[in-house]
């Protein structure tokens, strides 16, 4: 299990990751062999149970990648078990208010500053065999607490979210932004908003994230200076490769 936040801050050119939609340990291992730096196990848009997410966290870390999890919603019910599972951080989808962001990230920080419960006998605590101070240090300082801002108003107010005590990352949800605003990620207005949010994260000293559908957009976000860049997902990667192979074989 890596010290992920420090690793991401110190990485030149940004870290490259992808979404995990398939409940397959073998697929996760292949992503590690392919060279991804991290994966995000997607509980919002894939039917992963807590037990499945737990196994995928372990598989990703065993394959040499950091393991993040996107929560199914911003209620916070799954925060404790996922952190106990040893996840390197959590992404919170569809955050729209400061109160939401503050409440759920507070659940990711140990008492008395936050509300996370002590779980040294969990995987995160090395099943009770680890050092208590190292467990607390990693939990508070090396756990990514990244909120996803996905509408224009929230993104325009990104500086207010970045100033919250326990938020240490902002992820731009370009897909839902397109639905609500009608503007594509490559439009001039969205590109300018993206740069402003990125500047905000730099000024606040927190991590930034964005997702791309293809390698060209991933390169763009990496060159812009995003800390974490997602590209495609395991299901699409498999499906596209299978479709291309079938098409080539039938041609």
Image (cartoon, rainbow, N blue to C red):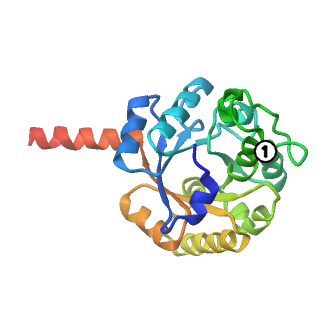
Q: Residue at x 70, y 74 (%)?
A: 203
90 and 211: which one is in front? 90
Classify 66 as above or below 77. below
Residue 70 drawn at (x, y percent) = 61, 42
Displayed quadrant of residue 127 = top right
* Residue at the image position 65 percent from the left and 69 percent from the top: 197
In the rendered image, the residue lying farthest to the right is: 112
Q: Is residue 158 above or below residue 189?
A: above
Q: Residue furthest left?
A: 251
Quadrant location of the N terminus? top right
Above or below — where is 233 with respect to 119? below
Along the viewing direction, whichever of 130 and 206 lies nearer the viewer: 130
Q: Is residue 108 left or right of residue 219?
A: right
Note whether 245 is above or below 13 in the view shown. Answer: above
Q: Tell which of 47 and 41 is nearer to you.
A: 41
> Residue at point 44% right, 69% down?
220
Q: Position of residue 133 (x, y in %)?
A: 77, 44
Q: Would residue 50 be found to the left or right of residue 221 on screen?
A: right
Name the element at disc 1: helix
Q: Quadrant of the C terminus?
A: top left
Q: Which residue is mark 1?
A: 104
Q: Position of residue 143 (x, y in %)?
A: 68, 48
Give neighbour class at mark 1: few <14, some 14-19, many 20+ (Cα, 10 Å). many
């Amino acid at each position: 299990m890596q010290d992920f936040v420090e690793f991401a801050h110190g990485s030149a050119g940004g870290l490259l990751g992808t979404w995990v939609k398939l409940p397959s340990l073998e697929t996760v291992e292949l992503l590690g062999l392919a060279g991804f730096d991290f994966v995000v196990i997607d509980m919002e848009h894939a039917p992963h149970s807590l037990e499945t997410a737990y196994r995928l966290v372990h598989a990703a870390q065993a394959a040499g990648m950091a393991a993040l999890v996107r929560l199914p919603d911003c209620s916070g019910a799954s925060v404790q078990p996922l952190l106990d599972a040893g996840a390197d951080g959590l992404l919170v989808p569809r955050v729209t208010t400061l109160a939401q962001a503050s409440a759920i990230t507070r659940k990711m920080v140990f008492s008395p500053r936050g509300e996370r419960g002590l779980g040294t006998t969990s995987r995160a605590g090395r099943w009770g065999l680890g050092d208590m101070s190292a467990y607390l240090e990693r939990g508070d300082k090396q756990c990514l607490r990244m909120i996803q801002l996905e509408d224009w108003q929230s993104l325009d107010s990104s500086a207010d979210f970045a100033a919250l005590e326990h938020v240490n990352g902002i992820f731009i949800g370009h897909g839902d932004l397109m639905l609500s605003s009608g503007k594509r990620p490559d439009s001039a207005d969205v590109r300018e908003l993206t740069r402003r949010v990125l500047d905000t994260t730099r000024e606040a000293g927190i991590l930034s994230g964005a997702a791309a559908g293809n390698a060209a957009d991933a390169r763009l976000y990496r060159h812009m200076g995003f800390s974490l860049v997602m590209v495609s997902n395991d299901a699409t990667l498999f499906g596209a490769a299978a479709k291309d192979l079938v098409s080539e074989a039938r041609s």
